[in-house]
Amino acid sequence: MASLDIDAVEAFVLTADLRSFTRAAEVLGTTQSVVSLKLRRLEERLGRRLLERTPRLVRLSPDGAAFLQPARDLLAAHERALACEAPQERRLVLGISDHVAGPDLPRLLARLGASDPALRIEIRSGFSRPLLEAFDKGELDAAIVRREADRRDGEALFTDDFGWFAAGSLASNAPVEPLPLASLAPPCGVRGHALRLLDAGGIAWTEAFVGSGIAAVTAAVEAGLAVAPLARRIAPPGAVDIGPNWGLPAFPSSPVILHSRSSDSRTRTALRTLAAAFRARR
């Protein structure tokens, strides 16, 4: 009976999901060349070309698209079989900053859960500083937050570029005074930084909308109610960076950092999967 290398199938699914040999290698804790070799052998075993490779892009071939769901099913069955041998569940308490999470988070977490059914994930969202304090107290196993000025520990995942975003209907108007601002409530670090920039630039502003979560803030932007300081990665579709045209101060970029204390190898793999997915979606 013909058989498939489960590690090669996992490498294929990760490469397809992350659209990158490099990101897949990060998750697997290996090198890009090893991932490429696994995939080449898998293609030879199946007698089909699964991926189309270009210098800047990895995408599924028609055969690869057809194989992707069976490959996921095979990995899930493999995990279920392993769970029969070692049934204990593991728990990961993960803190994620509101301004980091973005609209892709549910899909990323669903993928993470599918790749490791024995892992129970508890998400706590909030502001970066309180989440870091909770991590330091041992209340979180890991935290993905914006870098705080007084911290240099953790793993840098990527750097977010920020702008002043508004709906197209508002952006097409002449600058509004005072600037109608949408933000999270204090002590949001992004909000505080935005206000300091506006005050230093002598720009009058008013709080037009205060949201309890980033989804509410982006909804206010989409509705044309206000301007919000947002990472480009999470700005709503159709939103425009009005900063240059409205004479608003440049918003500096912000590194996103992973803090983790997990010693379990499979949990560390899960965190690498999530980290690579965040990098791939930025």
Image (cartoon, grey):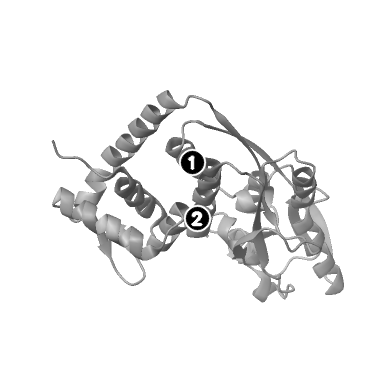
Residue 2 has which mark?
Answer: none
Q: Quadrant of residue 138?
A: top right
Q: Which residue bears the numbered disc 2?
A: 276
Residue 232's place in the image compared with 182, above or below, is: below
Can residue 95 be spotted in the picture? no
Residue 142 rendering spot, x and y as whole percentages = 66, 45
Q: Earlier in the sequence, mark 2 or mark 1?
A: 1
Q: Nearer the viewer, residue 243 or 167?
A: 243
Residue drawn at x 36%, y 54% is 15
Q: Residue at x 43, y 39 (%)?
A: 115
Q: Looking at the picture, how far across and down is residue 232, in whole percent? A: 59, 62
- The residue type indicated by label 1 comes to Leu
> Residue, x 35% and y 48% (percent of image)?
13
Most foreground residue, 150 or 207: 150
**Along the line of sight, the residue nearer the viewer: 173 or 248:** 248
In this rendering, position of residue 88 left or right of residue 173: left
Residue at (76% x, 49% y) in the render = 132
| Residue 112 circle label | 1
Residue 81 against residue 205 in the figure, above or below: above
* Helix, strand or loop at mark 1: helix
